[in-house]
Amino acid sequence: MAIDKELLEILVCPKCKGDLVITPEEDGIVCDACKLKYPIKEDIPIMLVDEAIHMD
């Protein structure tokens, strides 16, 4: 089961409130403005800035 598309539409980056896009692998949600990837674990996005992965 993948992340609910309706949920993805209402989620924003907790750091900058910007738009998020799901990765092609559907293993995370990315904020292009902050260059952060929020992981998805067991179909639940972990929307904590401290848990985000910095993308180079």
Image: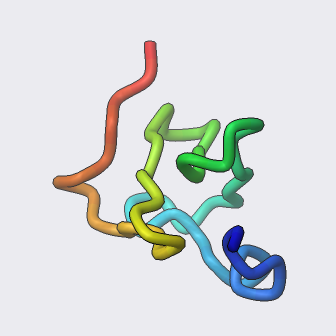
Residue shown at the point (27%, 57%) measured from the top left: 49
Residue shown at the point (47%, 59%) measured from the top left: 40
Q: Residue furthest top?
A: 56
Q: Quadrant of residue 41?
A: bottom left
Q: Position of residue 48 (x, y in %)?
A: 28, 66
Name the quarter where the N terminus is drawn: bottom right
**Image: 38 above or below 14:** above
Nearer the observer, 37 or 24: 24
Q: Residue furthest left?
A: 50
Horizontal placement of 15 versus 51: left or right?
right
Residue shown at the point (68%, 38%) measured from the top left: 25
Q: Position of residue 27 (x, y in %)?
A: 55, 47
Q: Position of residue 8 (x, y in %)?
A: 72, 74
Name the quarter where the C terminus is drawn: top left
| Tally of numbered tags | 0
Nearer the observer, 55 or 28: 28
Horizontal placement of 12 versus 37: left or right?
right
**Image: 9 above or below 13:** below
Q: Position of residue 30 (x, y in %)?
A: 59, 45
Residue shown at the point (33%, 36%) measured from the top left: 53
